[in-house]
Amino acid sequence: MRYLLLSDIHANLEALDAVLASASAHGADRILCLGDVVGYGPDPNACAARLLHAGITTLAGNHDLAAIGGEDLSRFNALARAALVWTAAHLEPETREFLRTLPARLHEPAFLAVHGSPRDPAAEYVVTTTVARRNFEAETFDLCFVGHTHIPAAFVLDEIGVRRVDVEPGVPLTVPGGARAIVNVGSVGQPRDGDPRAAYVVFDAASREIVLHRVPYPVERTQAKMAAAGLPQPLIARLSVGM
Ligand code: ZN
């Protein structure tokens, strides 16, 4: 079974379409989205519709919950909050209903998938080995895919301890038997690792091989839509640099 895992689309339709267009080349049996379909970007309804019509299993991210009133806006910074207010005002009823039904976790035979962290799916950022260790201790998964930080990375636990492993595009990462891992698949629509290209991961459950992919998309087109919508300038500018 081959999975394509994507996350943090953030209403960026051009980035999502670029990922879906390149997806067919990987022969994935299933595509999963780890949440944050909306927020920041100009196309929340079209992105939700793409996922819905493609039958892509999608989890709830913190922006998805906030956009429908399920998360306190005071937990977001001013720019994210401004974009969420815009998003909430522009959601169509079908999008609202789609977001309302998203689950927090997905248990597959070969892995667990959540938006933030295994112990706190909607909110926690797995950014340090300390946070990763607490999650390995709190939950029983062998392999967990996450999003939320918008930065591809892996945290691996073996007999030596927990270490952070950089994940480079096209370089396979294999979790050795007996080891456990939390793997961040990066962001489709608002990367923050200095690479503006959309990110996603292909996972082969038989070989346990994980490969990060990056795909370019017409950033200027998304930025023009954001400007026309009156979304905050810093959110527009950051897409050019992937930060
Ligand atoms: Zn996000």
Image: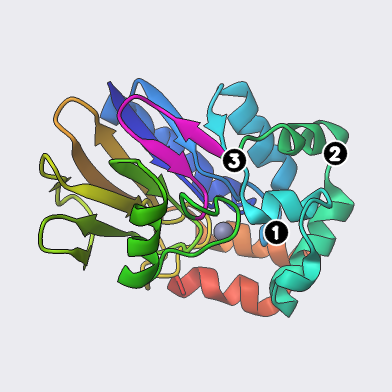
Mark 1 CB in 8 Å range of ligand 1? no
Where disc 3 sits, the SS reads: loop
Dot 3 or dot 2: first in sequence order is 2
Q: Secondary structure at mark 1?
A: helix
Q: Residue 97 is drawn in which quadrant? A: top right
Q: Quadrant of residue 176?
A: top left
Q: Residue 123 or 10: which is nearer the viewer? A: 123
The stretch in magenta equals: 105-116
Residue located at (28% from left, 26% from top): 2
Disc 2 marks a residue whose amino acid type is Glu
Which residue carries the number 2 mark?
92
Q: Residues within 10 Å of mark 3 (few under 14, many from 20)?
A: many
Q: Which of pointers 1 and 3 indicates the residue nearer the eye?
A: 3
Q: Which residue is mark 3?
A: 104
Left or right for 88, reference 5: right
Q: Residues within 10 Å of mark 1 (few under 14, many from 20)?
A: some
- Residue designated by label 1: 225
